[in-house]
């Protein structure tokens, strides 16, 4: 139905679905009793409902197709016809995240929005989906990513590709509806650690409307293997953290077994239980001991003398390990403030899996090794488990260099922006970033989107 209206909306004034005793508009959700339908004046035009400022109306797409001159100024003129404050949202959902909850969310968002702005990432890559941004007024688009931190990273990489193509003016602001487990980036930005239908999708869209734009540093991780001089270094993008040691070992073991038997890892409880078992095993075996003898660390070119550690973690965001404030620790010691946009990385050390567990329940502090703009690690011998944003692998002798790559425009949600009183208790359970590590940068960047 909506596809036909998008193709020819010249006489668009809503489209009515006929039920037993009433009619409902597929756009604004207005419901009218069938006996009252005749009393509606012909001048009553559908206003697209509560989320009109997020919906791409069919007449906009129709006029874009008729444009002879494709130029950002023309898109801005067309956008003005959609009303002031029009900030269309594109929904990119990973249907494999969160026990396939993304599939159900696709249907709900397609009901509330124009289906042309809702994308299934199992059918279309983010790069192709984001091309719709180039047909909309510059700087107006928001992207809602339904998935885990890995899906968010995938979308941010696609946005970097847009920059390389010279499409900087069409770069969207990115927000997250977290699915699955972990989701430390979503937690840092105030969207919580996971969504399981606690609030209706309508409230999610209201929160997107009220969110604030913040900048977030993104980093380049170069891994140059020792002895492979003629091979290009492995290059990865980092949003959350890099680590070598026990937490990377647990992630690697978990990832390996999940690849073998994916049906077994079907719930958050099972996933956390498996992580607990791997952590307990490492407490006994200590596969990563004597890390300080096997690795060298440099912060901004200065060598750091390491204590007897089993792991090193390099953080860009406030949360780590599924909701733990790693840099802050117990909160009983003064420590330099952290920000998402300061161009600095926080580097900490851990003594083992048991120490990681103590930090997560605020019974211990990490070993704060410092903050730096550039981090360099040299693995001198033997293979070690490593991970970048939850993607683990086993790495032999190498040199790892982490440098600043770019900044992404993200959307930050504070708990007080939620309208529903019923959600106040759940919002208080998920800590909002404290002022000293709030992602909100000063000045214009923290203005309303």
Image: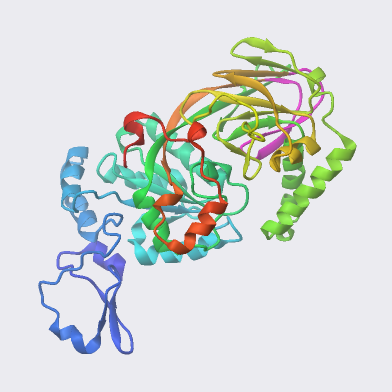
Residue 240: which quarter of the image? Answer: top right
Q: In which quarter of the image is the N terminus?
A: bottom left
Is 123 displayed left or right of 361 in the figure? left
Q: Can residue 304 be seen in this view?
A: yes
x, y (%) of residue 279? 80, 43
Q: In this view, does 2 lie above or below 20?
A: above
Quadrant of residue 348 within the rendered picture: top right
Rendered location of residue 81, percent (x, y): 15, 52
Residue for point 68% across, 60% down: 267
Nearer to us in this view, 147 or 187: 187
Of 155 and 87, the residue lying toward us: 87
- Is residue 122 in sight in this rendering? no
**Is residue 55 left or right of 252 when viewed as pictured?**
left
- As drawn, is 74 to the left or to the right of 374? left
x 68%, y 11%: residue: 303
Q: Give the range drawn in magenta.
A: 379-399
Q: Is residue 380 magenta?
A: yes
Q: Where is residue 356 in the image (x, y as percent from the top left)?
A: 74, 37
């Amino acid at each position: 139905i909506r596809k036909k209206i998008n193709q020819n909306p010249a006489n668009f004034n809503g489209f009515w679905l006929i039920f037993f005793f009433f009619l409902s508009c597929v756009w604004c959700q207005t419901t009218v009793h069938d006996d009252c339908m005749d009393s509606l004046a012909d001048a009553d035009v559908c206003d697209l409902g509560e989320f009109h400022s997020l919906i791409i109306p069919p007449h906009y797409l129709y006029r874009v197709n008729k444009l002879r001159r494709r130029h950002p100024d023309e898109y801005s003129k067309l956008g003005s016809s959609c009303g002031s404050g029009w900030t269309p949202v594109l929904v990119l959902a990973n249907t494999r995240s969160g026990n396939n909850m993304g599939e159900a969310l696709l249907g709900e968002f397609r009901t509330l929005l124009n289906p042309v702005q809702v994308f299934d990432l199992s059918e279309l890559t983010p790069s192709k989906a984001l091309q719709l941004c180039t047909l909309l007024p510059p700087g107006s688009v928001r992207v809602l990513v339904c998935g885990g931190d890995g899906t968010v990273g995938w979308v941010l990489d696609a946005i970097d590709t847009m920059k390389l193509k010279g499409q900087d003016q069409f770069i969207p602001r990115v927000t997250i509806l977290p699915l699955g487990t972990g989701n430390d980036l979503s937690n840092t930005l105030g969207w919580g650690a996971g969504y399981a239908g606690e609030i209706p999708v309508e409230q999610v869209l209201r929160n997107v409307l009220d969110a604030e734009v913040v900048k977030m540093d993104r980093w380049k991780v170069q891994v140059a293997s020792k002895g492979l001089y003629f091979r290009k270094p492995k290059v990865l993008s980092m949003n959350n953290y890099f680590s070598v040691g026990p937490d990377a070992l647990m992630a690697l073991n978990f990832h390996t077994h999940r690849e073998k038997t994916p049906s077994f890892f079907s719930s958050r409880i099972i996933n956390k239980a498996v992580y607990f078992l791997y952590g307990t095993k490492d407490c006994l075996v200590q596969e990563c001991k004597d890390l300080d003898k096997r690795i060298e660390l440099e912060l901004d070119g200065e060598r750091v003398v390491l204590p007897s550690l089993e792991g090193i973690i390099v953080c860009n965001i406030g949360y780590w390990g599924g909701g733990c404030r790693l840099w802050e620790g117990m909160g009983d010691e003064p420590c330099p403030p952290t920000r998402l946009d300061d161009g600095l990385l926080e580097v900490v050390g851990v003594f083992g899996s048991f120490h990681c567990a103590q930090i997560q329940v605020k019974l211990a502090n990490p070993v704060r090794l410092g903050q730096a703009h550039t981090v360099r690690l040299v693995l001198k011998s033997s293979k070690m488990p490593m991970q970048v944003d939850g993607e683990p692998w086993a790495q032999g002798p190498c040199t790892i260099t982490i440098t600043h790559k770019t900044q992404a425009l993200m959307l930050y949600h504070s708990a007080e922006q939620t309208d529903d009183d019923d959600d106040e208790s759940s919002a208080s359970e998920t800590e909002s970033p404290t002022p000293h590590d709030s992602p909100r940068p000063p000045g214009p960047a923290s203005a309303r989107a």
